[in-house]
Amino acid sequence: MSENTEEVKLLEAQILHLQAEIKALQQQQQVNCKDITFQFTGQMQDALAFLCGQTQDLEEMVVSRLKEEVEELEEDLKLQTRIDGISLNSCIRKTLQNRGREVVQLLCLSGRCSELVFQVEFQLSEVKDGSRTERKISDLNLVLDSNDLQSLSSFLSRYRPAPINNGKIIERK
Amino acid sequence: MEGVSTRGVLSHLSLLEDQASSRGSRVLQQPSRVKELRAKVEALTSQRDQLKAEIQTHKNLQKLRPSVDKRRAAGGEEDMDVDSESSELLRLMARHSELSDLLHAHHLIGGYDVIKTRQGKGMCFSLATAYEGVYLDTYNLEIDLRPKVRITRHNIPPFIPLNNLAEQSDLQIGLRAFLDTVSQHLNAFAGRKQQLKLVKEQHKSVEVMESNLLCSILVLMFTVPKEKTPLLCTLEYTNHTRCLPTRVHLDSEDKRLPDAPQWKKNCSLLMEVPVHRALAAIRKSRDIV
């Protein structure tokens, strides 16, 4: 009987230890999941499941299905680039805040439009209001390889707060 | 390290259980309790390993994607880390992520989200509108490419002259010019509509007497302080691609009022600055209540 009590005690201690480990890991995962870039659907979800040993699918199957989807996306991007007349090279997103109803991201884009090369950075806030989502842009920064920023100053000032003074709106240069 | 100790504990427990059962344990409760606990340990261990695998995968993916923090630390563009240990699957996932982000970026910068329809014979465009950094309504337009380029379905309001614009642009040559013009009209309309909404929200002392669906006419009633004289202000937006009025007209029983210098100034302001912001300035200078 003393051996059994010893076993039970040992097991119970082990269980507590595992539960604490799991809690810590879950907290870490919460942080990961708040990052929008890791919320996967479709083939990406399947691929993640495969990498975590959660599916019975063969690696070749998962790879080939994902490859197909990637090729579709490449085609979509080519078409979108043609339609918009803007070619984007890179898009980096960082989730600054994710409180369920409100998500704030930092976006850094670089690309080319006609002969003009540009980099633009801004904050995007999305607030769910019932079925609608309200999206706002703020803190816009633009890097242009051009001397002609004057024509853009009024556009830029719309996305940066401007002080009102004596009935006139002063644009920040 | 934990793996080894868990196996060590389990095998030790196994041994103890064998010894106990070979001695013919008289206490029937304990073995099933031990079994129950062992099952729980196994379940928790598998849950923990699962979580570790997911977190590690996220880490691996993160290594393959450029990130804001990495870029700022390195002070420049960085190539994706080509790790020889990264599987083809991880690389595909990283590329998938990158493409999705780029498409999303096109969407955010106000591109015309395009989807192919009818097995490539048609295209459906989404035109987003926004005003002062706030995204507003999105409109959709479906275009057939064969046999001729023509608009089939859309949800653009009838007071936007879509067919006229289509005729002016010659759809057969290219869609960009047409889409740009429609987008201009829609965004200007959205902007004027939003300004009207803000006037109603922010300036309750100003009465909206008249407005139309296209928001190209706005008639407001101001109250001048002191004598509480009513002042009627008509804003005409004849250029439908703009959010600012082309004409501002004042009417009052006091005929001298519209000619007063500060009201000439206020009219100029109303022509140069969106109405809700102009009204804020005018109220601040106490020209109206």
Image: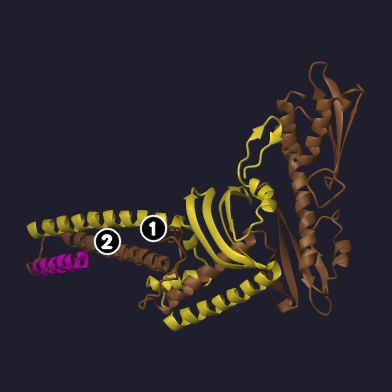
Chain colours: A yellow, B brown
Task: Name which residue lies at 77% across and 64% down.
Answer: B179
Q: For marks 2 and 1, give the CA distance.
A: 22 Å
Instruction: Please name the residue shown 64% across and 57% down the image.
Output: A147
Classify mark 2: residues with Cα within 10 Å, few (<14), some (14-19) or many (20+).
Answer: some
Percent position of residue A154, x then y: 68, 47
Residue furthest out toward the top: B226
- Give the image location of residue A46, x and y in percent: 47, 72
* Residue B113 on the magenta segment: no
Q: Label 1: which residue?
A: A29
Residue B40 circle label: 2
**Residue B214 in view:** yes
Q: Nearer the viewer, residue B125 or B10?
A: B125
On the image, which quarter does residue A6 sit in?
bottom left
Q: Which residues are magenta?
A: B1-19
Is B12 magenta? The answer is yes
Q: Nearer the viewer, mark 2 or mark 1?
A: 1
Which label number is shown at residue A9? none
B140 vs A12, left or right, is right
Q: Position of residue A29 (x, y in %)?
A: 38, 58
Image position of A141 (left or right of B260):
left
Q: Check if mark 2 and mark 1 are on a common chain.
A: no
User: SS at mark 1?
Assistant: helix
